[in-house]
């Protein structure tokens, strides 16, 4: 199981790592860097979903809001934890 706290900690770490220039924003290039080719096709669409103000970059707060939405969608039983069955897998349509 993954708790909400663990999920949020992992997303914060991801944002910090992806924000390679440390300016507090993640660009599409930063977001796609290091992703496998199979995932890169979906990356631009996902990035645009996170970029709610459509300024071409994702702020920490936009990233956090996206994570909140994602967790709520994945936590199908609403218990505040993600079980193995709730965790996303490639090709299941959750991402």
Image (cartoon, helix red, strand yellow):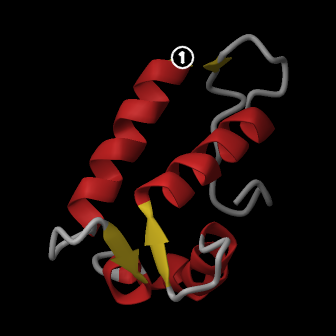
Image quadrant where residue 81 sits: top right
Vertical side of 83 occupied by 66: above or below:
below
Q: Nearer the viewer, residue 95 or 91?
A: 95
The residue pinned by badge 1 equals 1
* Residue in the image at 17% along x and 68% along y: 22
Q: Is residue 17 above or below residue 20?
A: above
Tell whether 17 sits left or right of 38: left
* Outermost residue, left side: 21
Find the residue positioned furthest to the top: 79
Q: Is residue 65 above or below residue 58?
A: above
Give the quadrant of the N terminus.
top right
- 59 vs 54, left or right, is left
How many dots with numbers?
1
**Residue shown at 84%/18% (left/top)?**
77
**What is the x, y in percent for residue 46?**
63, 73
- Whether residue 3 is visible to the viewer of this picture, yes or no, is no
């Amino acid at each position: 199981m993954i708790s909400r706290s663990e999920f949020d900690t992992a997303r914060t770490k991801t944002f910090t790592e992806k924000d390679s220039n440390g300016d507090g924003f993640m660009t599409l290039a930063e977001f796609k860097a290091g992703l496998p080719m199979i995932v890169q096709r979906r990356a631009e669409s996902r990035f645009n979903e996170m970029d709610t103000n459509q300024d071409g970059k994702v702020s920490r707060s936009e990233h956090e809001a996206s994570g909140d939405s994602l967790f709520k969608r994945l936590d199908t039983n609403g218990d505040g934890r993600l079980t193995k069955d709730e965790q996303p897998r490639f090709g299941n349509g959750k991402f």
